[in-house]
Amino acid sequence: MSFLEPDVLVLGGGGILGEGWMNGLLAGLEDAAGVRFADCRAFVGTSAGSIVAARLVAGRELRRPGTRPGPAPGAGPPRGRLVREAVRVGWQATAPIAPLALAAAAPAGAAVRSLALARVPTGRYPLDNLHQRVGGWRARFDGRLRVCTVDRANGRRVVFGAPGAPKASVADAVQASCAIPAVFKPVRIGGREYVDGGAWSVTNLDAAPVSRGTRVLCLEPTGALGLRGAAFRVATEIELQALRRKRAQVQRVQPDRDSAGLMAVLMDGRPLPKVIAAGYAQGLTLAAG
């Protein structure tokens, strides 16, 4: 696979380790290919991907091997308990609805998602440390950044930063995009509650602003989950075809074998330094073609 410098960068959900892998991979590509991802024309971020997208829009350096990692989202509860709840309840209870939403009418997908969200309890843990970290970057919605969330009450996808979207700060939108249902507290913006954009789709690739010839790079950390991530891959494949019908050039990258071997539990931050290093090595390989 040869690397094409993108016009639009789509960064998917993938927990603590997914964020680390995307940072490492993009940093490796920058160092080997001489590109600067902060100069992309547009960014679409979902959950962990929204953190990386905000970092780039703010002009901050990507995390590379050997850099000191920041605090993990939701550092308050015991780590083992957080991992169990995220895997058992959060993502499993709200598998992506994108196949239904794109195959039928979007309101039908929203109705199914609304019912699914109503069945899971409200998350208990805040993401205040994440809000503070992203707020400190001073990123803003400058027309390039799009952050994907789901309205908890009606199940509709809301893409903050897109034309016609409700107003929000980048820190609020990113916090909402990372609020895994049943694990983290929903985020209230403008009187409504929002949760993880991954409850709609782990990439939200179809939210990318494209036209004929637009080059899109989509990073999909959940590709590390193997058979457990089958529903996620189906959703992304449908979105991928939607962009290709618009004649966009889409390059989709998932963790390679070395990276995936470290990413069995995406919310377990213990292997994070190794995941960043593995992502960086994958980026160097991708750049070399």
Image (cartoon, grey):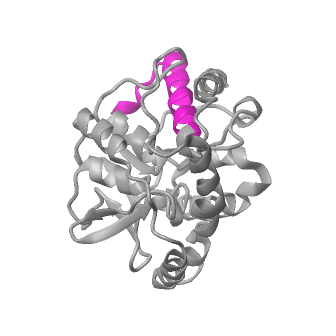
Q: Quadrant of the N terminus?
A: top right
Q: Residue at x 31, y 36 (%)?
A: 133
Which residue is at the front of the view, 244 or 262?
262
Which residue is at the front of the view, 22 or 103?
22
Magenta segment includes 32 = yes
Which residue is at the front of the view, 8 or 197?
197
Q: Quadrant of the C terminus?
A: top right
Magenta segment includes 23 = yes
Please, which residue is most extreme toward the top here?
A: 66
Residue 96, percent across and down?
Answer: 59, 66
Residue 181, percent across and down?
Answer: 49, 63
Q: Is residue 227 left or right of residue 84?
A: right
The residue segment tinted magenta is 17-38
Q: Is residue 144 above or below residue 279?
A: below
Residue 259, percent across and down?
Answer: 69, 32
Q: How many marks?
A: 0
Which residue is at the front of the view, 89 or 102?
89
Q: Residue at x 34, y 41 (%)?
A: 129
Q: Is residue 67 above or below residue 45?
A: above
Res 146 seen here: no
Please, which residue is most extreme toward the front here?
A: 78
Q: Is residue 233 left or right of residue 153?
A: right
Q: Is residue 129 above or below residue 35?
A: below
Q: Is residue 178 above or below residue 39?
A: below
**Res 87 quadrant in image:** bottom right
Q: Residue at x 60, y 49 (%)?
A: 81
Q: Is residue 98 left or right of residue 175?
A: right
Q: Is residue 3 left or right of residue 77?
A: right
Majority secondary structure of magenta residues: helix
Res 228 seen here: yes
